[in-house]
Image (cartoon, rainbow, N blue to C red):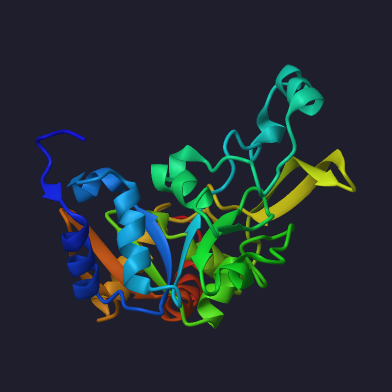
Amino acid sequence: MSPELPLVTKSQLIHDLSSLGVAPGQTIMLHVSVRAIGWIVGGPDVVLQALLDLLTPAGTLMKYIGWEDDTDDFYQWSPEQQAVYLAERPPFDPQTSRAYRRWSILSEYLRTRPGAYRSANPGASMVAVGGKAQWLTENHPLQFGYGPGSPLAKLCEGGGHILMLGAPLDTITMLHYAEHMAAIPNKRMFKYRAPLLVGGQRTWVDIEEFDTSSGIVDWKDEDYFAIIAQAFLGAGNGNSGLIGAAQSYLFDAAALFKFAVQWMEQNLVIGKE
């Protein structure tokens, strides 16, 4: 870390997290920018340890981690690129496949933490540690992995919270669950191919999702995730504050999901202006 950043200790992190509303026994889905927090004394692992200490073993910490070198845009590649991957891309293994580093250095740190459970959907893969970790990540549907039965649906069902620790509001993964469930006509979809272990053999499988990259519809402002989050905050929901130097938010997952579905059904049907 740069010495120009403010020093942030584990005890300060626990104090700041508590002030924001993180408490023992909660189930938390984490989105984080480590750099936004400051110069963390002891390194990035301290962020995870502070959260887990505060949550206690009864609590649970979950994070979206995806899959490094993913194949989400397989069908957009050249025939030559597709051929190389079809021939030699190793299959997705929930136990060993690396987390996508784009989603923070802490993704791989949490995946490799003792006692971690990782869901078996390659593109929508989640990892969790704690009391509800196995339940959250087990039986993750392969098709439409952000919908019913997903860790996101279970987070709402289980009274979970979403912690935006210095992360931008347009990165709230929970809102993909709202996109899935919102009653909106002609939602955009996409398919990709991923190599999975099926009966011990590497098998390329077609996977279908609603579009989690470009949005489910064209709209006047593509960044509607941030708009939804700001509207939710503006309606008096959620907690906000600093954790270290990072502007952070704590949301009730089920409340945000319900708000987002209603917002999408009222606004996204108008089409692009």
Quadrant where the C terminus lies?
Answer: bottom left
Residue in view at x 73 percent, y 29 percent: 89
Q: Residue at x 12, y 47 (%)?
A: 7
Quarter-wise, where is residue 193 in the image?
top right
Whole-percent x and y of residue 82? 75, 25
Residue 107, compared with residue 19, is above or below; it is: above
Residue 25: quarter of image? bottom left
Could you tell me residue 208's position as x and y percent? 73, 53
Q: Quadrant of the N terminus?
A: top left
Residue 183 visible to an observer of this rendering? yes
User: Does residue 65 appear to the left or right of 191 in the view shown?
Assistant: left
Relative height, residue 36 to residue 81 (above, below): below
| Residue 40 placement (x, y as % from top left) | 21, 47
Q: Could you tell whether 120 is left or right of 169 in the image?
A: right
Is residue 168 something that shows in the picture?
no
Q: Position of residue 192 (x, y in %)?
A: 71, 43
Number of marks in picture: 0
Q: Nearer the viewer, residue 130 or 263?
A: 130
Vertical comparison of 180 with 98: above or below = below
- Left-right relation of 149 to 15: right
> Which residue appears at 38% of the width and 65% of the height?
52
